[in-house]
Image (cartoon, grey):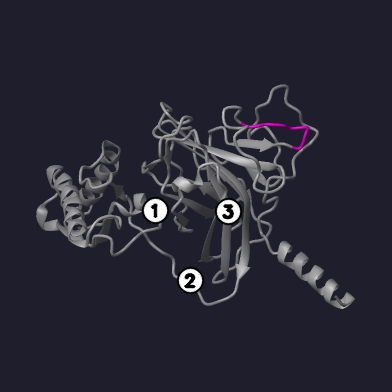
Amino acid sequence: MPRLTVITLLLLCNFLHAQNLVKNPGFETIDTSYHLPNPSDTFDVHDVIGWWNPGVGTTDYYNCDGQHKHFGSPYFGKEMKAHSGVGLGGIYIEHGKWKEYIGANLTDTLEAGKNYRFTIWLALSARARYGMPHMQIEFWDVDYVRVADYRSDYPRSNAKFPPVELNGTARASMVNTWTPFTVDFTAVGGEVSFVFGYLDDYWSSISLPDNPKNKGQDPYAYYFIDDLSIVPLAGPPIPRKTTVRPIIYFDTDKDIIKKQYFSPLDSVVTKLKENAHMTIIVNGYTDSVGNVEDNLDLSRRRAEAVKKYLVDHGIAESRITCAWYAESRPAGEENEQNRRVEFIYKP
């Protein structure tokens, strides 16, 4: 290969690498002067350069460079190796008890109207009984933001920057397997930092298949995290996808609302009571298993079950419209994501 071509390729690779606005994207650069007397560490007490813990939980840090072997939770730490290099993060999410996040300052401020691509590698712990059907990136215009004061808090949000959402993050195929997630978005402008995690103000989870490690465990999700990037992207503005929360998920071939969704539905009731002129559309869906006729009826029953809950809690029937679509509008590749009811509010 000609020498000029080699130099050009090297310069191009360096330029592409430099485009990443996430400093220390694989958690490789750490304060090696700091040593703990026991094999546990978190983003709070160990200097992972460019990162911090924006909540109150013990967001985990793992590093197997020989000096910092199996930092983080010893319960999960020996389960996974880094996607690349030797460093990785871990966050624990348990209903009503514990929520963890990671945060980072960007190397440059995002420009208004400019497109960017966010990429992250995630894996679910084999010990986890649940996965979260979606995760979010929320941007801020301040450094080192703190989004929660107590470990069970739902995080504070920033209305100026609508969250960017990753869907399909509860796949059974993610258990102990690194999986890439990518989402493109257009910046509002002024974003200097971000927080990543499950950022909804209600609990919504999908059960993972039983295995010897998660049998009898508490109802939690645990994610390993590595190799994050935010890079500029050419093209016209990207419409921001809006999903009305909450999403109610159902078991296979069932139309019974699970108890974990009572609280999210109560928040819908509260919203409707506080906005007396608002109406709501309840949309029912199924996965692709079974025939169309049966699925259409199942999606109807799911929508009507949710409508009944709202009516039983004081919302007039005249304010609720049901629609059902069977498997015709999938939310993702996994069946668990598609067995659902979603909402549309109408002022």
As helix, strand or loop, the secondary structure at mark 2 comes to loop
Image mark for residue 334: 1
Per the picture, the main secondary structure of the magenta-coloured stretch is loop
Residue appearing at x 53%, y 33% in the figure:
57
193 in magenta: no
Task: Identify the residue position indicated by label 2 in the image.
Answer: 238
Eye-nearest disc, 3 or 2 = 3
**Residue 38, position in %: x, y?**
69, 22
Query: Residue at 41% across / 26% down in the picture?
Result: 216
Choose the circle earlier in sequence order: 2 or 1. Answer: 2
Which of the 4 quarters of the picture holds residue 330?
bottom left
| Whether residue 146 is visible | no
On residue 217, which mark appears? none
Q: Dot 2: few (<14), some (14–19), or many (≥20) neighbours within 10 Å? A: some
Numbered range of the magenta stretch: 65-72
Q: Which residue is mark 3?
A: 120
Across and down, in percent, residue 292 comes to 21, 62
